[in-house]
Amino acid sequence: MGVTSQRLALNSGPGTQRYFDEKGSYGSGGERVRIYSKAWDPNNGIWWVKVEYPSGSGFFGWTGLKRFNSNSFNLDDVYTEYWY
């Protein structure tokens, strides 16, 4: 679980709309959200994390790591997916 720092802009994969469809923006800062995995985006040089929002809904999407408070979880403990 991680704590959001802002709304979650979710995409269908770990990258921008150039590569993946946008799913929308959800929630607000200060929410605890389950993080399932991470993926490195070499095109933008950032980590993306896969989340389920809202929890228990079965609705998954990818959002940039910057949308979470970095001290609310350990990124090294999150499973890594390889997309590129």
Image (cartoon, rainbow, N blue to C red):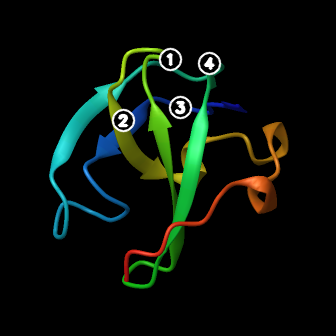
Q: What residue would you read off at disc 4?
A: 31
Q: What residue would you read off at disc 2?
A: 60
Q: What residue would you read off at disc 1?
A: 55
What residue appears at the point 36 percent right and 23 percent down from the top-left corner?
Answer: 58
Task: Give the CA distance from mark 3 to mark 2.
Answer: 17 Å
Task: Give the CA distance from mark 4 to mark 1.
Answer: 11 Å
Taking depth in this image into account, of 83 and 8 the one nearest to the observer is 83
Taking depth in this image into account, of 6 and 17 the one nearest to the observer is 17
Of circles 3 and 4, which is in front? 4
Callout 3 crowding tier (Cα within 10 Å): few <14, some 14–19, many ≥20 = some
Q: Secondary structure at mark 2?
A: strand
Task: Give the CA distance from mark 4 to mark 2.
Answer: 16 Å
Mark 3–mark 2 CB contact (< 8 Å): no
Q: Which amino acid, by three-letter code, is at mark 3?
A: Gln
Mark 2–mark 1 CB contact (< 8 Å): no
Of circles 4 and 2, which is in front? 2
Res 25 → quadrant: top left
